[in-house]
Every structure is written in structure tokens, then in C-alpha cells.
Amino acid sequence: MLFHVSIAAHDPRHVAEVLAELWAGDALFFPPVSDNGWIVLARDEHRSALEVYPIDTVLREAEGDADAVGEATGREPFTATHAAIGTSLSQQEVMSIAAREGWPAKYRKRGGMFGVVEIWIEGRQMIEVLTPEMQDEYKATMSADNWRAMLRSFGAAASLA
């Protein structure tokens, strides 16, 4: 189970508030790593969370018996880090929120298996939002056996060791 994941944003508070809206959760100040960090807490049985840090924050190992620390780098690259989150909203409601924010969004079918609404937060950070129907597709198709079958169909049998 994934309990939380972190992303970076130019406006962490605003991004956290929009994600909280998509998730029907709460956006709260989260100061342990950054003076402008925010956390989105879902109101689900898993206590799922998304941490949102300023765009130039990186985590560094701390010496001795201490938590990792955040460090501002001044860099603003794109990132491969992303998350897929579930929502109780409809696809149209999700698209409307993205449009209101000016964030690119489109429906995509991942590998022909499950749908997502691909949203580009602030035009640079991808998050996949799954409506209830998309969540059902995901749960029905995302298994190791199904993944192996997909790899075989792409001729990737050598990597199935």
C-alpha cells in the first residue's frame, strides 16, 4: 500500500487546495520539510496523503539520528515523479477543475487497460486522476499476471525473469 507521495509545485498551497478538492480531502500546512510545504489528507480508510513542496525543494539525508531535511536548490526541472489518485468526482467535474486552473488535462486509456484523466499541474507536473469507473478498471487490470501478459504481447518475454 502506498501511504503518501510528494510532489513539487510553484504554488504549493494552491496545488494542495486543488488536489484536496479533487480528493474531497483537506489541505493543511506541513512545515517539517519546508517553510511552504502542504499536505493533502484524503478522508479515506487508508489515510492517504500527498505532500506538496516548493518547486526547488529536494530531500537530503541528515546526519545521525535525524529525519531527512529539505533543501532549496533553485532548480525547476520537469520530473518523472507522478501519482495516480482516486476521486469520487465524475470525469467532467475533474476536467472542469483542471480547466478552471488552466492546467492541461485529457482522458487517456493506459495500455488499453484503464482510463485516467491526465492533468498537468501548473503545466509541468503530471497527476493521473481516476474516477470511480476508472478505479474499477484499474483494479480489474493491474496485477502482476496481467502485466506479464502485456509484456509478452509486446515481445518483452526476456525481461520477465
Image (cartoon, grey):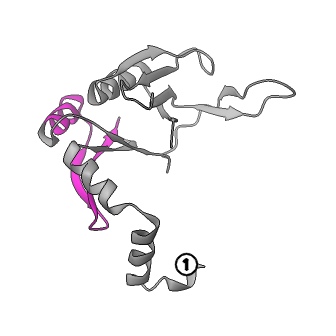
The question of residue 96 being in magenta is answered with yes
On whether residue 135 falls in the magenta region, the answer is no
Residue lying farthest to the front in this orientation: 45
Residue depicted at 48% across the width and 82% down the height:
156
- Between residue 67 and residue 59, name the one nearer to us: 67
- Amino acid type, label 1: Leu
Query: What's the magenta region?
Result: 93-121
User: Residue 27 sits in which quadrant?
Assistant: top left
Horizontal side, residue 132 vs residue 120: left or right: left
What residue sits right under mark 1 in the picture?
160
The residue under the point 40% across, 29% down is: 45
Q: Position of residue 35 (x, y in %)?
A: 58, 14
* Residue 136 visible in the displayed image: yes
Residue under the image location 31 percent in, 55 percent down: 138
Q: Position of residue 36 (x, y in %)?
A: 52, 16
In the image, 92: left or right of 48? Answer: left
Q: Is residue 154 above or below residue 59?
A: below
**Horizontal and vertical percent position of residue 2:** 51, 41
Query: Viewed as shown, does residue 53 lie left or right of 60?
Result: left
In terms of image quadrants, where is residue 130?
top left
Farthest residue toward the left? Answer: 92
